[in-house]
Each structure stands twice: as structure tokens, then as C-alpha cells.
Image (cartoon, rainbow, N blue to C red):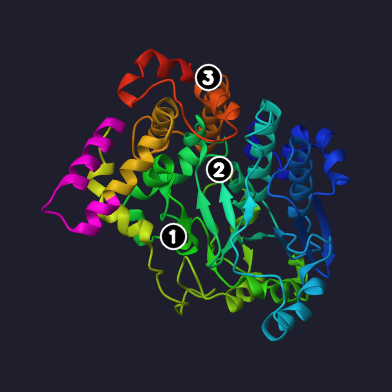
Amino acid sequence: MSLASVPPAVATVSTSMSKGVAALISKNVSILPVMCSRRVLIRKSYLTADEMHGLAHRLSVLGTNGSINSILISRDRYDNGLISSISEVQNRDRFYFEDFEVNPYKIDDCYKGYDHNSNDLSEDTLHGLEALVKATNSSQKAPVINYLNGMVTDGGYSICMGRYVVATINTRFQICNPSRGLSFDPIGFSYILPRLGKDYDQLSAEYPAVGKILALTGYVADGYDMVATGLATHFGDWLDLPYLERSLGQIPPYETQFQTSRDRDRKFNEFPIPENKFYDAAVASTLDSFMAGNAAITDIAGIGEIGEYPVSKLVNYAKGFHDIFAEDSVEGIIDGLKKASNDASTNKDYASAASELLSSLKAQSPLALLAAFRLYEHGVPNRRNADSWGNCIKRERKVILKLAQKHDYQNWKKRSGAGGKWKHSSVGEVTKDELDELFE
């Protein structure tokens, strides 16, 4: 029976219910009622496998609940288990007028998935990431909203696959795994990255290099980059979180709201939910009212513009290096960046950017880099071998589990994440058989 025919709650329960008890009593995850909304508080940037499975199960059940209107996920900024509208409303004035000690513009870790330095990289942990992806992405009624403030890396993005993702001036996104000797965490990056910008017909969709730059170089995307590519759906202010939280709570439950057929949902999902052709206008309009802009650049009715296209360094890089990253091999990309960085006739800023990207590429594990590139190519649309999101996740899981046993990752762990003495000094030293073995 395909997952498409199974309600999300049931599909996730089959793999996650047995793991749910730990998360239900976990000090790291809380779900609190805020009138007609639900607030998910996450206290640490890492989740254990049990916490992932348990949270996935609870999100799946809440997503089918028509008696609430939304599920708002964010870090517990004060680490006190209280909703933001209780902890922070009075402290906002204290920050401005009494030199309050909390600095809302400091970039902290937000979501990192699991702890790569420990022994957390197991098949159970990776299944937990997959369960979170499916739970956040397949909500039938109450939309999942994730308010990001800080660094999101690798599998940490699994919890950011909901209908709405808010980035702030502090938000950062990075794929770090190739610098650890690993490929993508299995949440579907090889499917998502080649399609960046397509959900909202953004300018970034014209430059496929945006996905390859993120996948291969360890580029750190900021909040503007994320909105410009669709990795985030909205751009807002972290200080508005408690007010948004309270406003969402005052909206009537999903089943009593006016609904519109203009669907601005993200289309990663290969598990179509027929009931989800409608989404509630009340939550979307409330969210828009707090935001500086959204990825669609339109209001809820699709009539008026909201904000403008953000200036994105990542999109500019993708435009400038489009031909280089269109090469069909990692070696070709490296050679192209070498030429661009050494070409005296080019603009100095262009040469400097090429040199920066080249240095980042060379710092990665050669075997992991080639594995990430091949995974990416499997997910590229409009190719005969382009695959579904679900199959991309399965392939990513297979490859990363094999890489986890290889020299590069084991040596990275021994060096406490200090980075590579890699087995191969360059991608040219990696044999085809070594790479093929990862995908068998």
C-alpha cells in the first residue's frame, strides 16, 4: 500500500509511535496550547532518535486536528518551557529601555538535526529525520509554521519542511556534511535543491547553480538567500514571534474558517493529500501581516504585492557562475573556478568569489563531495533518471550509512570535528568503483 493512500498520522505512527514515549516525557520538546493554536518549543539544536520519532507522531496527529488552526514551531529562547508571549512581551521593552541582557541579533544554533560528533548517526536516527520530514510536510488541516532564528544545518532542515517557514536577519542555512566526510542527511536534499525557486516562480529558478553551490561548497545562506530561493517562505523579525503566537491563538479553528482555493503551498510532496487543495486564509493573512515580505511576493488573494524580491548574494553567485556549475562533473566545476579565480581580465570581485568557492570545494572530503554530486544529479528534474522525493530520501540514507563507515568520517570524528585529513587528496584520486560501491 502506498503512503499516498495512508493518512499522515497513520503513516508516521507505523514507524514512530513506538518511539513516542521518550519524546512525550522529553525535557527537550514541549507542545503547549495557545488558545486555538499549538506551540512547539524545542530547547536544543539536536534531537535524539526517540525525540524525532515522538515529535513526528505528535505533529502528524495535530496536523489532522480541525479543532486547532496552526502549529507554530520555534526554539525555546528563554529555556524555561513557557510560550513566547508570556516570556517575552514585557522583556521586549526591557531590551530597548533597560539594556536587557538577551541580544536578539546574536546568531545561535537553531536546528542541527542530530549530533554528528557522537554515535547518533544510526539507521534509527535517519528514520527519525524522515519521519519528521513527512510529518511537517503533509499536514492536512493545521498548517505547520516554523520561525527560524539562528543556524540551520543538514538534517536540522527536516523540521522546516512545513507550509510556512519564516527566516529573520539572523537565520542561516548550511550543508556541512561533505566537510565531515558525509553526504546529504536523508531528508530529500537531492530532490529539493535542484528545484529551488520553482515553487514560487522566482528568479533563482532560472539559475540551477543555486542548488549546487549549497550542496557542494558549504555556502552559508542568510535569510535573504533563503527567501529568494524558497527555502523559507517569509521574512520577518524575531522580536515579533510572541505577538504572532498570540494572534494565531485568537484565530478560529480550521474547520470554522473561510477557505480559499488559491494554494500557495510548497510542492516538495510526492504524497498528495486531496483534502489539502484548500488552505485557510486566516492563518496566511495573519502571518503576512507580521512579515516584511514573502517568497511569492503576493498577498493572500494574489492581487497585491507584498515586499519586493530580496537582494541575494547566493542568487548573484549562481547567475555569475552559471556556466561553471553547469559542468557535468566535480572536476569540471573545480577547473572552471580555477580559471575564473586566476583570470586577470575578469572583475576582481568575480575572481575573489570564484577563489572563495574553490577553497570551500577543496576543503570537502573528495569522496563525500562526489557522492553529494551524484545524489544531486539523480534528483535533477527533466532528466531520464530524475527520481521522486521518496526515492531520493531512500538513496540518501543508503549512501550516508555507507560513508559513515568510511575513513573520512571516522577520522573527522576522531579529530573532534576539526576537519580533514582525507583518504584522497583530490577528487581525481577517487576511483569509479569506490563511488559506485556507495550506491549499490
Q: Residue drawn at (80%, 71%), measured in percent from left and top?
A: 87
Classify mark 2: helix, strand or loop: helix
* N-term mark: 1 or 3: 1
On-image quarter of the N terminus: top right
Q: Say above or below: 316 vs 137.
A: below
Image location of residue 5, percent across then percent down: 66, 38
* N-term mark: 1 or 2: 2
User: Can you tell which mark lies on residue 347?
Assistant: none
Residue 382 or residue 130, whichever sits in front: 130
Image location of residue 320, percent across then percent down: 25, 54
Q: Nearer the viewer, mark 3 or mark 2?
A: 3
Q: Residue drawn at (73%, 84%), measured in percent from left and top?
A: 98
Image location of residue 154, percent across then percent down: 55, 43
**Dot 2 crowding, Cα within 10 Å, few <14, some 14–19, many 20+:** many
Work out whether residue 248 can be spotted: yes
For the stretch drawn in magenta, the main secondary structure is helix
Residue 325 or residue 336, whichever sits in front: 336
Classify mark 3: helix, strand or loop: loop
Span shown in magenta: 329-353
User: Can you tell which mark lies on residue 225?
Assistant: 1
* N-term mark: 3 or 2: 2
Residue 179 inside the magenta-drawn segment: no
User: Can you tell which mark lies on residue 154?
Assistant: 2
Q: CA distance from mark 1 to mark 3?
A: 33 Å
**Mark 1 touches mark 2? (CB < 8 Å):** no
Which residue, given by chain and number where applicable, does mark 3 sit on? 406
Q: Say above or below: 18 vs 237.
A: above
Q: CA distance from mark 1 to mark 2?
A: 16 Å
**Dot 1 crowding, Cα within 10 Å, few <14, some 14–19, many 20+:** many
**Dot 3 crowding, Cα within 10 Å, few <14, some 14–19, many 20+:** some
Q: Say above or below: 311 vs 339.
A: below
